[in-house]
Image (cartoon, helix red, strand yellow):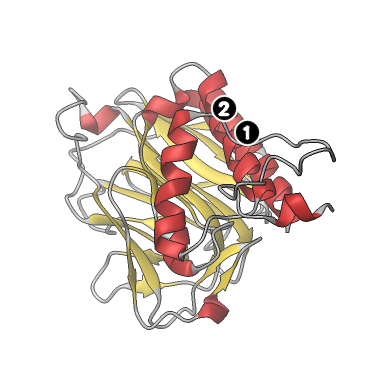
């Protein structure tokens, strides 16, 4: 790998040295805004290869109609130089890293790892959010997704609150893959696989779609009024909070993206992780 590829993306010679050729730099405006915020948090810009990986990722999301705009709260939990930079939101609310996190809990190529005891991420997005009034029917216009690079046990990946009223959002691997979208848990016949997206999306009151471990499908499950507990990553917002030891590289919360959006998101994040790994 060339010296220029290792330079921060915003270095004067990031595009290449005079007389020695050039290399591509990020160009998407949303990407540049995000990278600048990460650089401010990290104290330095990410390498050119990481920056162009994020640029390619955002352009891939925008290539699927409606997908980028449907992502209302999201973090790329890898690539940044520090865990602080990794918690800079790609969209929406900034999350809170709850517990005493250390540098050892973060991998630039794999993401953030929980300890199953005290560490989790509060997305600071309520399960019943209408995203500042942009959603007319938040009960039936919603998605949750997380890209898992490491799986440990059957604990939660991403969840609001489990309750008898059956109105929560939920992704975990207890006894298989369990999902809920404004509904009770539904177990699907999909074995958990690392380095894949785990997500669901709902656009009606009778069923929701999912994309889990490379498999797409649908679950018949009637929706109910969603609870107003914050959605957690690496945890479930019950009392007490249940935490996990998975490793998560990306999460997204927002409006319905359907089967096509879930599959496109899976592919885009997979390519992102691969490109970041190649850059580092």
Q: Nearer the viewer, residue 183 or 257?
A: 257
Please give the name of the residue rendered at 51% of the width and 57% of the height, measured from the top-left corner: 77
Q: Quadrant of the C terminus?
A: bottom right
Indicate the position of residue 274 as horizontal and vertical percent values.
73, 48
Indicate the position of residue 90 as horizontal and vertical percent values.
41, 44
Task: Please indicate whether residue 137 sits to the left or right of residue 263 in the image.
Answer: left
Q: Find residue 108 and report its image quarter.
A: bottom right
Residue sitting farthest toward the top: 65
- Work out whether residue 279 can be spotted: no
Indicate the position of residue 27 as horizontal and vertical percent values.
56, 30
Q: Which mark is residue 194?
A: none
Task: Please indicate whether residue 91 sits to the left or right of residue 166 in the image.
Answer: right
Please give the name of the residue rendered at 17% of the width and 38% of the height, measured from the top-left corner: 225
Please give the name of the residue rendered at 43% of the width and 19% of the height, measured from the top-left corner: 66
How many marks do you count on the picture?
2
Task: Please indicate whether residue 206 sits to the left or right of residue 165 in the image.
Answer: right
- Work out whether residue 199 can be spotted: yes
Task: Please indicate whether residue 44 sits to the left or right of residue 227 in the image.
Answer: right
Q: Do tag 2 and tag 1 residues touch (Cβ < 8 Å)?
A: yes
Q: Nearer the viewer, residue 76 or 21?
A: 21
Please give the name of the residue rendered at 41% of the width and 40% of the height, measured from the top-left corner: 33
Kindly state the secondary structure of the residue where label 2 is placed.
helix
Q: Which mark is residue 56?
A: 1
Indicate the position of residue 83 as horizontal and vertical percent values.
47, 68
Pointer 2 local density, CA inside 10 Å: few below 14, some 14–19, many at least 20: some
Q: Nearer the viewer, residue 148 or 18?
A: 18
Residue sitting farthest toward the front: 19
In space, the residues marked 2 and 1 are separated at their CA atoms by 5 Å
Q: Which residue is mark 2?
A: 59
Kindly state the secondary structure of the residue where label 1 is placed.
helix
Pointer 1 local density, CA inside 10 Å: few below 14, some 14–19, many at least 20: many
């Amino acid at each position: 790998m060339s010296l220029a590829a290792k330079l921060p993306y915003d270095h004067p010679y990031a595009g290449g040295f005079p007389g020695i050729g050039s290399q591509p730099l990020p160009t998407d405006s949303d990407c540049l805004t995000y990278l600048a915020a990460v650089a401010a948090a990290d104290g330095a810009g990410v390498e050119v290869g990481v920056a162009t990986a994020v640029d390619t990722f955002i352009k891939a999301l925008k290539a699927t109609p409606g997908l980028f705009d449907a992502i209302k709260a999201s973090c790329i939990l890898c690539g940044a130089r520090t865990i602080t930079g990794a918690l800079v939101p790609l969209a929406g609310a900034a999350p809170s890293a709850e517990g005493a996190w250390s540098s050892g809990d973060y991998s630039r190529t794999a993401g953030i790892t929980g300890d199953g005891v005290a560490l989790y991420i509060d997305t600071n997005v309520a399960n019943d959010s209408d995203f500042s009034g942009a959603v007319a029917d938040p009960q039936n216009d919603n998605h949750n997704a997380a890209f898992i690079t490491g799986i440990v046990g059957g604990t939660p990946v991403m969840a609001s609150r489990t309750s008898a009223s059956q109105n929560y959002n939920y992704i975990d691997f207890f006894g298989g893959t369990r999902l809920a979208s404004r509904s009770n848990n539904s177990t699907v016949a999909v074995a958990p696989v690392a380095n894949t997206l785990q997500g669901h999306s709902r656009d009606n009151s009778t069923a929701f779609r999912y994309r889990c471990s490379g498999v797409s499908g649908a679950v018949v499950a009637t929706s109910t009024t969603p609870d107003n507990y914050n959605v957690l990553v690496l945890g479930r917002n019950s009392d007490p909070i249940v935490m996990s030891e998975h490793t998560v590289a990306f999460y997204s919360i927002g409006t319905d993206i359907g089967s096509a959006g879930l599959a496109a998101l899976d592919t885009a994040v997979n390519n992102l992780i691969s490109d970041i790994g190649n850059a580092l």
